[in-house]
Structure formats: structure tokens, C-alpha cells
Image (cartoon, rainbow, N blue to C red):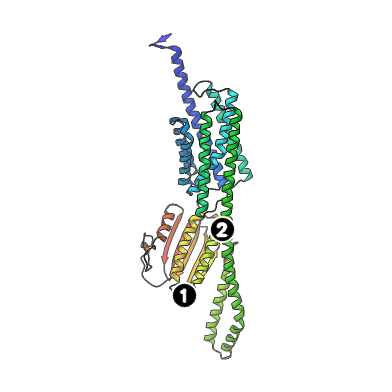
Amino acid sequence: MVKNGIKEDEIMNIILFQKNVVLLIIIIIAHTAITTFIQNKIVIQILNFEKTNFKKIWVLQTIIFTLIRILIPTYFHKILEVIVQTILYKQYLKITIEKALLATEVNVIIFSITELFVFKIFTELFKVKSMLITNSLMPFLISVVFAIITIKLVTYAIIKKAKVKIYIPEVLSSYSKMQIIEVASVSILLTVIDQTLVLAWLDNLPNSIYFLDIILLFSYSLISTISIIKTIQIEKDKNEINNLESNNDRLQNNYDSISSFRHDFGNIMQGIGGYIATKDLDGLQKMYNDVVCECQEINNTKAFDLEVINNPAIYNLINNKYLIARKNNVKINVDVYIDLNSLQIKTYELCRILGILIDNAIEASKECQEKIVNIKFIKDNYYNRNIIVIENTCKNYLLDLSKLKEKGFTTKKNKVLHGLGLWKVNQIINKHENLKLVTSRDKTFKQQLEIYSWK
């Protein structure tokens, strides 16, 4: 039967085609949404990333990946997806480029190889010879999508139960960064190119060659991952050695101080005896205060303990600053009353902030007659925040506190390469809604970093 010049069976074919197209789009959206959600959970679990902006990343991935898979030719899908994924991870997880590439590599290695395997198995089962949108293609696609989602869910369950984690140091050397970037980039590129070519030649490749390719690709990816893990482990070992060296220097200084004090104890007692014999109470009081002050300085070093300062990065930073202060005859007092690993701020960013603030405090206090820097880590349960106070003695000159955060502002005589520290601190703080820096001055100069704990 002919209707308006078009056969009825042709109309039915057009309607069926449109229905299949709609069903295909629904399958693509569902597959993209579910798989990206699981993949992001796995990446965060393995690489121990914070869940910051997790939902935003997931929604953006779902939208962008769906558009890519619908509008862009198949051969360009993967390369575009890995680029978009790396950019989203870096931007919204607030991580470095090497960590973003490593996160993308984890996704590519685990799931691209899985998808190749599943696709081939179901192609053989359903005897699919063409990817044309027909009624016979839909059961195949639904089965493939269901199998891939199931495998990813099982993979996530295993990884979570086994507590598989790769701990990446917050601060990496330039060499380690470049090594991770190179290995991860090559691994991603090779996997994407291989997957694209294999799927393009799917009908012409014997099964033995196809599965051999998957095995070789998996082997290479495994070797690449082991190489990156070894690089990270070497970096962690270097950091540990640096921590031990700093700790050893501090302990040596402490030992020297205690030995010196012990050696002079007899002389000190004789001096006290002289004041007692002459009943010079003013002299005795002054000498007593000096002795107590030195004893307190020796006792204060007990705070420089890894069990007290329980974050290795912050521990190493404060120890190094302690040694710098000691060389400049600056006394540093440290009080820690919080778990430094529970702070809702990246250790890398906290180290940058603390390093700048402590350096400024040492610089200011060493110009004073009384050279003192106080560092306190305290908890404020009422406002659900942790507070880090860095307080130092300073000269009595007028200072416009509002200008401290301006780029290039400095109180130092040499203006070159100065005036960027507090400006950089302010940049970091402005990126986070839960951070606040309060600057005040009375008898001492005080910087108070407030870190709010928001769930």
C-alpha cells in the first residue's frame, strides 16, 4: 500500500528506526551516568582523593560524555573523553596535573580493557556483524551495557573491601612529577589508540589476535602502574629520610643544649650560692628567672614529636623552621591540641600557608630584643573549627594591616622578590569557603588561620 508516495512498510521502518534511535540515546545516557559514577568512586577510593565536587564532576562527565558519544564519530570518543576527564579531575578535585593524569590512567586501564573484553564476548554470542541501528542490535547493546556495569560494580566492591589505596605525597620532586606525567600519558595514549584500532578492525581480527592484544595491553598497563607506584614509594622514602635527618638535627641540638646545661649546672649552683651568701635577693631572682627560662626552652622541645605533630609533612616543616629560628636566636614555642590529619584542608596547601606565615614570624621577631614565635594548634568546638595561631614579637612601628595581603607589599628594605607571601596565602584561602585568616596586632603580631569543619 502506498501513502503519499511512500510505501507503508517504509513508514514503519522509519518509525522503528526513530524508536531505536531514542532507545539508543537512553541506553547511552544510562550507561554514561552509571559507569562514570562508579569509575569516580573507584578513583577516589584508590587514590585517596577528597570527595570535593564529586557530584559536579559526575554531572559534567555525564553531559559531556553523552554529547561526545552521540555527536562525535566513534574513533574520537576515547581521546576526547580522557582529555575532558583529566581537565575535570584537575579543576574540580583541586589536584595537580600528575595526579589528574594518574586518576585518568586508573580509569583507562581498568575499564577500557574490560570493555574490549566484554564487547568481543558479546559480539561472538550475538553474532553481531554490523553496528547499524536495528531491532537486532538493541538486545546486544543492552547486554553489553549491563555486563560492563556489573563488572565495574564488582570491581568497586573488591577494591573497597580490600582497601586498595595508593598514597601520593602532597609534595613531589620535579623529577618524580615528570616521571609520573610521562608514564601515565604514554599508558593512556597507547591504551586509547589500541582500543580505537582494535574496534575498527573488529571483524577482520582473529579471536586469538584480539585476546592476545588485550593480554599484552593489560601487561603493559600493569608494568606502567607498578613503575608509577615505585616512583611514589621512592619519593615517600626520600621524604622519610628528610624527616629523619631533620629530627636527628633537632635531637642533636637538644642533646647539646642538655649536655651544656648539665655541664654548667655546678657553676650555676655556685652562682646561686653566692647570691644567697650575700643575701642579694634581686640578683637571685634574676638568675632564677634565667635558669627557668632555659629549662622551659629545653622542655619545649618535647612538643617537636611525631606523636604530637602527627602529620609527617607538617612535622618536617615545623622542625625545619625550628632549626632556622634557632640559628637566628629565635625561640619557638609549639602547642598542638588537635589531630592534624583531620583538618579539612589539603596538606600541600596547609604547608604552603604555614611555611609563609612562620617565615614571616621568624623574620619579624629576629629584629626584636625579645625573639619569640608561638605556634598553637587548637580546637574550637563551639564554632566547629580548628584554629592555628602564629604569634610573634615585633618592633613597635605603625603598620596598615589592610595592605598586608596586597601583591608586592612588604616591610622589608629589599623590595625585590618580597611581598608575595601573604598575597599567595590570601589566594589559597579565597579558593576555599571553610578557610579564614584573621590578622591582628597588639603587643605581638598575630595571624590566626581558621579551618571550619563542614560536612
Question: Between tags 2 and 1, which lies in front?
Answer: 2
Pick whichever, 33 or 96, lies toward us. Answer: 96
- The amino acid marked with disc number 1 is Glu
Q: Position of residue 161 (x, y in %)?
A: 63, 43
Q: Which residue is mark 2?
A: 239
Name the residue: 55% across, 81% down. Answer: 288
Name the residue: 50% across, 21% down. Answer: 134
Q: Element type at marker 2?
A: helix
Q: Earlier in the sequence, mark 2 or mark 1?
A: 2
Please rate how many residues cluster around mark 1, counting C-alpha atoms within 10 Å: few if below 14, some from 14 to 19, many from 20: some
Please rate how many residues cluster around mark 2, counting C-alpha atoms within 10 Å: few if below 14, some from 14 to 19, many from 20: some
State whether residue 283 is above or below residue 380.
below
Name the residue: 56% across, 91% down. Answer: 278
Q: CA distance from mark 2 to mark 1?
A: 34 Å
Q: Which residue is mark 1?
A: 370
State whether residue 297 is above or below residue 199.
below
Q: Position of residue 359 (x, y in %)?
A: 46, 65
Q: Position of residue 429 (x, y in %)?
A: 44, 55
Q: Position of residue 232 (x, y in %)?
A: 56, 51
Q: Element type at marker 1?
A: loop
Residue 344 in sight from this viewpoint: no
The quadrant of the image that shows the N terminus is top left
